[in-house]
Image (cartoon, rainbow, N blue to C red):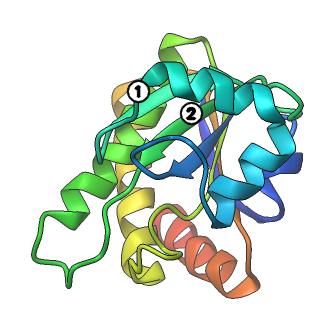
């Protein structure tokens, strides 16, 4: 049976099958979680990412984890927040669904997500978390199995939002 949970922590330290990188469309590193993942994985990640030739918003691509404890990095490009009227929710949901599909295709049993698009891309955390939880629940319902999905939050306030959304479904 699949599980969905939220934790507070550093995604680069998680020993899971795959961590998801909130990447930019070049896949060549950047700030926030993207930069942290590239720094922790080492230069071989950048070399492999160059071969992928970028990624469209809402899509995902997979690489090795290199120096990370995770075996794989799934890179997904979240939408920039433009007020909620530019298909942001559908694109963000696609990030989660594309990442989960790619993970399952590579026999991933545990996957950790950061809060995609909530940093420099400006997506409000409460709305982004709702999209993330809804899309993930939809996926695990439609693809029964033994997948451990972790929402890895950087802050206590983000964790509280995810925990409330997850608890609302469990009660």
Residue under label 2, please give it.
Answer: 74
C-alpha gap between disc 1 and disc 2: 14 Å
Residue 92 appears in which quarter of the rendering? bottom left
Is residue 150 shown above or below 107? below
Image coords of residue 29 (percent x, y):
61, 49
Q: Residue at x 62, y 21 (%)?
A: 48
Q: Position of residue 144 (x, y in %)?
A: 46, 23
Mark nearer the viewer, 1 or 2:
1
Residue 53: numbered disc: 1
Residue 157's spot in the image, x, y percent?
67, 87
Q: Position of residue 20 (x, y in %)?
A: 60, 43
User: Crowdedness of circle 1 by 10 Å Cα count: few (<14), some, many (20+)?
Assistant: few
The image shows a total of numbered marks equal to 2
Q: Earlier in the sequence, mark 1 or mark 2?
A: 1
**90 above or below 65?**
below
Residue at 86% across / 35% down in the picture?
A: 68
Q: Secondary structure at mark 1?
A: loop
**Res 164 quadrant in image:** bottom right
Q: Quadrant of residue 88?
A: bottom left
Identify which residue, 144 or 12, lies in the foreground.
Answer: 12
């Amino acid at each position: 049976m699949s599980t969905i949970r939220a934790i507070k922590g550093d995604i680069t330290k998680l020993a899971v099958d795959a961590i998801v990188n909130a990447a930019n469309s070049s896949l060549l590193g950047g700030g926030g979680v993207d930069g942290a993942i590239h720094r922790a994985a080492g230069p071989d990640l950048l070399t492999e990412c160059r071969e992928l030739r970028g990624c469209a918003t809402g899509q995902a691509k997979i690489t090795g984890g290199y120096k990370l404890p995770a075996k794989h990095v799934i890179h997904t490009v979240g939408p920039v927040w433009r007020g909620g009227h530019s298909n942001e929710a559908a694109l963000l949901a696609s990030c989660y669904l594309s990442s989960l599909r790619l993970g399952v295709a590579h026999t991933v049993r545990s996957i950790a997500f950061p809060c995609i698009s909530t940093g420099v891309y400006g997506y409000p955390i409460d709305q982004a978390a709702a999209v993330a939880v809804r899309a993930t629940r939809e996926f695990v319902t439609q693809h029964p199995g033994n997948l451990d999905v972790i929402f890895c939050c950087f802050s206590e306030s983000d964790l509280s939002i995810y925990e409330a959304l997850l608890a609302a479904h469990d009660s």
